[in-house]
Every structure is written in C-alpha cells, then in structure tokens.
Amino acid sequence: MRITAQKLRAKGACGDDIKVFEKRWPDGCNVTRKNCEIAFRKLEMNVEWATAYLLSASVFKDIEDAADDACDKCWESKGPDVDCVGHCNWNKVYIEAFYQAAKGKEAS
C-alpha cells in the first residue's frame, strides 16, 4: 500500500498528522515495517485512525479485537487502572497488524 498526504486528507486525517507525514514523506511512502515504526512510534501518528480509515472495516474489526485482547491480558495481570497504550502490547498489536494487512494492498 502506498500512502500520500493527499490520501490522508481525502480520508479525513487530522491536520497535525498530515503535516508530520508530509514533512517526513513529502512524496508519500510505501507501507513497510520500518515506515510503520517511524510513523506510529517515533512520529506518534495515530495507528488506530490509520487502521480504521485506510484498511477495510472487516480488517479493522479483527485488529481492534486483537488489540482489545492484549489490553484484557494486561488488565488481568496489572489491574484495570493501567494505561494500556503505555503498558501492554496494544500499540504493538495495532502497528504489526496494520503492517501485515497493508503490505502489498491498496488503501480502501
């Protein structure tokens, strides 16, 4: 899958994420594991948004379910007051699942 700032605008991405994306990838980029790590970890772009709006609804649902399972396991071991994004595999699940679903596909 190739992602461009134009595609992000068309899908309704927030202005801040579009600016960050455009600065890093002025000509767009292909979805690679490295680019996913840069976008969603280093640049802190919204992986949940990307999953919901750049992939199909059924793929998003599967990824959301897997991330929810990661949170449930975290809460069982650390308690319900823990911040899932910072303490469990929620973000990691989303990033890897986005990469796996997006590689070699066109954005919906």
Image: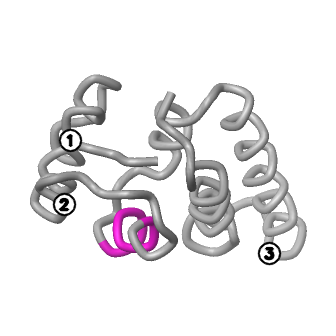
Q: Quote the CA–CA distance across marks 2 and 1.
A: 8 Å
Q: What residue does disc 3 label?
A: 78
Tell me which numbered mark, 3 or 1, is placed earlier along the sequence: 1
Q: Residue at x 81, y 64 (%)?
A: 75
Amino acid at the residue labelled 3: Lys
Which circle marks residue 28 in the picture?
A: none
Q: Nearer the viewer, residue 71 or 26?
A: 26
Using the rendered view, name the quadrant where residue 65 is placed. top right
The vertical placement of 2 against 23, above or below, is above
Q: Residues within 10 Å of mark 3 (few under 14, many from 20)?
A: some
Q: Position of residue 92 (x, y in %)?
A: 62, 69
Q: Residue at x 65, y 49 (%)?
A: 101
Q: What residue does disc 2 label?
A: 25
Q: Are marks 2 and 3 in contact (CB under 8 Å)?
A: no
The vertical placement of 63 against 34, above or below, is above
Q: Position of residue 107 (x, y in %)?
A: 47, 35
Q: Residue at x 69, y 70 (%)?
A: 89
Look at the magenta stretch and give its main secondary structure. Answer: helix
Tell me which numbered mark, 2 or 3, is placed earlier along the sequence: 2
Q: What residue does disc 1 label?
A: 5
Q: Are marks 2 and 1 in contact (CB under 8 Å)?
A: yes
Q: Closer to the observer: label 2 or label 3?
A: 2
Using the rendered view, name the quadrant where residue 4 is placed. top left
Q: Position of residue 26 (x, y in %)?
A: 11, 55
Q: Quote the CA–CA distance across marks 2 and 3.
A: 38 Å
Residues shaded magenta: 36-42
Element under disc 3 = helix
Q: Position of residue 7 (x, y in %)?
A: 29, 33
Amino acid at the residue labelled 1: Ala
Q: Residues within 10 Å of mark 1 (few under 14, many from 20)?
A: many
Q: Closer to the observer: label 3 or label 1?
A: 1
Amino acid at the residue labelled 2: Trp
